[in-house]
Amino acid sequence: MTEFAVVLISASSESESEEIISTLLNKRLIACANLSSKTSSSYWWKGSIEKSDEFIITAKTRLSLVAKITEEVKIIHSYEVPEIIALPVLDGSRDYLDWLNDELPSNE
């Protein structure tokens, strides 16, 4: 199993996204995050197809921290069911992965 993950989180606004990123950084649950500009999302919700503008957060962390990230995001998030999806990092730049390792708390 790999040690690191990329976590994708969608949010309804730039300000909500920034609050999520700030909280996760301040709690040392992520080493960094990218915030994508507004995008259009289409999805099923309660029996019908919906469309809305969203912002996408791409956060880098340890797999072992994903459960804590999910808890924190659910406290802040405006959605009833926020998108929080973790993808394992299978490989990458050794320098970048070493930096991630240095910036995140050790596995407990």
Image (cartoon, rainbow, N blue to C red):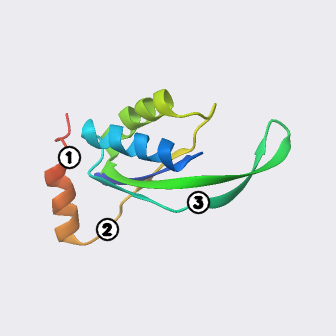
The three-letter code of the residue at mark 2 reads: Asp
Q: Is residue 64 above or below residue 40?
A: above
Specify the label residue 104 is tagged with. Answer: 1
* Residue 101 horizontal side relative to residue 74, left or right: left
Specify which label sits upstream in the sequence, 1 or 3. 3
In percent of the image, x 79 and y 48: which residue is there?
50
- The residue pinned by badge 2 equals 91
In percent of the image, x 36 and y 60: which residue is there?
89
Q: Residues within 10 Å of mark 1 (few under 14, many from 20)?
A: some
Residue 1 appears in view: no
In percent of the image, x 34 and y 46: which residue is there?
63
- Residue 57 horizontal/vertical position (percent): 46, 53
- Residue 30 horizontal/vertical position (percent): 30, 46
Q: Secondary structure at mark 3?
A: loop
Specify which label sits upstream in the sequence, 2 or 1. 2
Which residue is farthest front? 15
The three-letter code of the residue at mark 3 reads: Lys
Q: Nearer the viewer, residue 83 or 79?
A: 79
Q: Nearer the viewer, mark 1 or mark 3?
A: 3
The three-letter code of the residue at mark 1 reads: Leu
Q: Residues within 10 Å of mark 2 (few under 14, many from 20)?
A: few
Q: Nearer the viewer, residue 6 or 88?
A: 6
Which residue is farthest top? 75
The CA distance from mark 3 to mark 2 is 29 Å
Q: Which part of the image, by quadrant, shows the C terminus?
A: top left
Q: Is residue 41 above or below residue 79?
A: below
Specify the label residue 38 is tagged with. Answer: 3
Residue 31 appears in view: yes
Q: Looking at the image, do the residues carrying marks 2 and 1 touch, with CB atoms under 8 Å apart?
A: no
In percent of the image, x 22 and y 62: which residue is there?
97
The CA distance from mark 2 to mark 1 is 17 Å
